[in-house]
Amino acid sequence: MIHIRQFPCLKDNYGFLVHDDASGETAAIDTPDADAYLAEARAAGWRITQIWNTHWHPDHAGGNAAIKAATGAVVIGPSEVSRIGQAPDRIVDEGDTVALGAHAARVLDVGGHTLGHIAFVFDAEKIAFVGDALFAMGCGRLFEGTPQQMWTSLTKLTQLPDDATLYCAHEYTESNLRFALSVDPDNAALQARAIEVKTLRDAGKPTVPMTLAQEKATNPFLRAPLLKERIGKPGAADWEAFGKVREMKDNF
Ligand code: ZN
Ligand code: FE
């Protein structure tokens, strides 16, 4: 059995600790804030033994050195993490598997936000940590990759089971929702989700994690192929429609 603790970090990041009872292993998923992670682990009575990075951005790998110094944790991540400090102890990419005790997580290449962005998928548990690749009704900005690359990445995530639980790294949901409603206003599932999101946020609760089914029904980036007419791209390839939606959000 694995346990997940989710806690706010920095302005709008979420921190995640994943713990396996049997082995006592604990993985920090990204490291936006070393102090917050160490305090959370202490409160749980867990010792961080691994760090799993999704990409190199400082709000994802900036706490690696301090957590490693405090705990001796092994850092696992894409090679691009060396851009902000030490290279990971173990560099992983698509096809690799990482282990938390007896629980295995598959590494997916979901590049686009950064070129080397990866996701960690616990297939047996139907849980994925997707970093800044996919957000609730949103997706990461294309700082380094192309629309085509990002579309390929998102398509991989849509192949997970519909009831998979997706943990993304930011609470961007309300602003994503405003854009989603502007581009997909007739979507009844989106309208219903808007009410759910408002209820959660008014109560000070996170909208993360999400299920893949929710995203397929309401995320305008995943729904880009269905929105071609509306966004003025009839006959475009799916990735081009995605690129157009991304561009519209960037200018929203
Ligand atoms: Zn990022
Ligand atoms: Fe981020």
Image: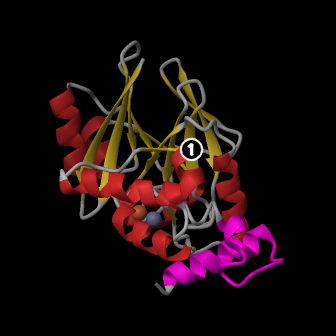
Q: How is the image coloured?
A: secondary structure
Instruction: Answer above or below: position of 152 versus 183.
Output: above
Where residue 238 sits: x, y (%)?
76, 68
Reading the image, the residue beneath label 1 is 213
Q: Most prominent secondary structure in the magenta stretch?
A: helix
Q: Nearer the viewer, residue 241 or 48?
A: 241
Where residue 123 sits: x, y (%)?
60, 30
Q: Nearer the viewer, residue 158 or 29?
A: 158
Which amino acid type is shown beneath numbered disc 1? Answer: Ala
Residue 171 located left or right of residue 187:
left
Where residue 96 sits: x, y (%)?
66, 38
Tell me which residue sits at (56%, 82%) in the image: 248
Q: Quadrant of the N terminus?
A: top left
Q: Which residues are magenta?
A: 224-250
Q: Looking at the rendering, which quadrant does residue 221 occupy?
A: bottom right
Q: Residues within 10 Å of mark 1 (few under 14, many from 20)?
A: some
Where residue 137 sits: x, y (%)?
49, 60
Tell me which residue sits at (63%, 36%) in the image: 161
Residue 214 located left or right of residue 92:
left
Q: What is the count of numbered marks?
A: 1
Please tell me whether residue 172 belongs to the stretch shown in magenta.
Answer: no
SS assignment at label 1: helix
Q: Nearer the viewer, residue 4 or 95?
A: 4
Tell me which residue sits at (58%, 82%) in the image: 247
Please tell me whether residue 235 belongs to the stretch shown in magenta.
Answer: yes
Q: Is residue 146 visible?
A: no
Q: Ligand 1 appears in which quadrant? A: bottom left
